[in-house]
Image: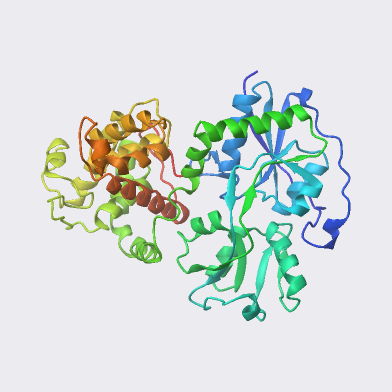
Amino acid sequence: MRLSFFVIVGVFVAACDTSNDQSKQSVKQHKQPALNSNELVFVTHNGPATYYLNGDNEYAGIEYDLATLFVKKYAPEYQIRFLLVNSISEVIPTLLKGQANIAAANLSVTHLRKELVQFAKPYQETQQQLIYNNENNTKPRNLATIVDKSIAVPIGTSFAERLSEIQKDQPQLKWQALHQTNSELLLDQVANGVLDFTIADSHLVAMMQNYYPNLSVGMSLGKPEKIAWALPKNSDPKLVKKVNKFFDKIRQDGTLRNLLDRYYGNSKRLNTQDITAFLKLSNSLLPKYEHLFKQAQETTGIDWRLLAAVSYRESHWDTFSTSPTGVRGLMMLTESTADLMGVTDRLDPKQSVPAGAKYIVKMIDTVPERIPEPDRTYMALAAYNIGYAHVEDARVLANRLNLNPDSWADVKKTLVMLNDPEYYTTLKYGYASGGAPVIFVESIRSYQRILERYQPSHPSTNNSFKIAQTD
């Protein structure tokens, strides 16, 4: 049976509050959906760390990718169905009501949750962090210094559990567990001065700091936690075994590492000053050239926000930019590349932008077609920076070191080895400053992600190929 995908949006009004005393009451576990129904139901919720609709109107998110990959590889005889609830507080109650087989919802493994459900093998580690606005507040020395401040977390989260435990020793600490909200929204409120503090997972914080440079980490709370899928305690043991086998396999073969890199690998590339400067020029200078990037998208199919990100990383959108090595213009074209692309004046934005876009296409066409997106584009961008020959050397080296030469997460590890004589003397094209293209690509990923958050997509008239958006 072929895999089919569809989404049911579920709204559950009566959800268990697992952050307060009610959570200690026993919860009846209902009969689970039978596996012979040819359907596996995953309960999740909207969020950048779980499941969302991207700019191409396609579903994305690491939990979405993991769930679809699991069914495709380990349970192809079943259809997959996503049950989307409004908040994380509804996830486990939905599971316990027998309305889903698996919760794939960025759930931290906690003692309280383990009393209610069983967890599969974890796939990620995270750290709870107290977050504040560095423009409105100073970094707290400890929790006792912020008892007069507003602290809020989503209800039913591991953050609420943590605060409940802390409050036993510090009863003066005041905080709220809010309904109908999520960590992303609360981080947004902290950034905008509506809320003093919130607690969030480190991987989400790193991502959100790319959009809000005024978000800072006040302190870490407790020890790192594991993130895993949850299943009812009365689940079919065969299903539990399949899930654990799946996570063992993707951890061993590099698939999990590649997925984590795809969603979070570039999150910490930019510092606060980088993001602040980029946001400022996005408002003041980008509008002057936006139409050129959109025109280039129409002829090449490459998302204009990716082109704008490349241009910013190259020239900071300064059309007169010239490097000591002689590369010039918005897309910082070399003289040989300009000649190849038919450019007569590299300082002319009307020539530079489309030429740069077409050269990226050329690099993409050079990268083996079997390499999936977005890895193929990342390798093409590295080639745009350093030349495809060195990218190919890095892929050869990855293969020698039993890494995946078709995975950007692995190739970026070997690119940085190209300045080490132990390695480059054994490769066809020799020495290269391989760290530069890694920084180049990871910075572009971050800039593109910021633009995708604040700038709308643009329809392409050329659909000969499609460049995947950042996830």
Quarter of the figure with residue 69: top right
Q: What residue do we see at 44% from left, 51% from top? A: 452
Quarter of the figure with residue 101: top right
What colouring does the structure picture have? Answer: rainbow
In the image, 63 versus 389, the foreground residue is: 389
In the image, 269 versus 285, the foreground residue is: 269
Q: Position of residue 384 (x, y in %)?
A: 26, 41
Taking the image as shown, residue 422 lies to the left or right of residue 162, namely: left
Q: Position of residue 172 (x, y in %)?
A: 73, 79
Tell me, yes or no, if residue 358 can be seen here. Answer: no
Count all numbered tags in the image, as a single digit: 0
In the image, 185 versus 442, the foreground residue is: 442
Q: Quadrant of the N terminus?
A: top right
Tell me, yes or no, if residue 306 can be seen here. Answer: yes
Taking the image as shown, residue 425 lies to the left or right of residue 108, namely: left
Q: What residue do we see at 45% from left, 53% from top? A: 267
The single residue placed furthest to the front in the displayed view is 422
Q: Position of residue 50 (x, y in %)?
A: 60, 46
Taking the image as shown, residue 122 lies to the left or right of residue 160, namely: left
Quarter of the figure with residue 98: top right
Q: What residue do we see at 15% from left, 50% from top? A: 327
The single residue placed furthest to the top in the displayed view is 1
Taking the image as shown, residue 56 lies to the left or right of residue 344, namely: right
Q: Position of residue 95 (x, y in %)?
A: 78, 42
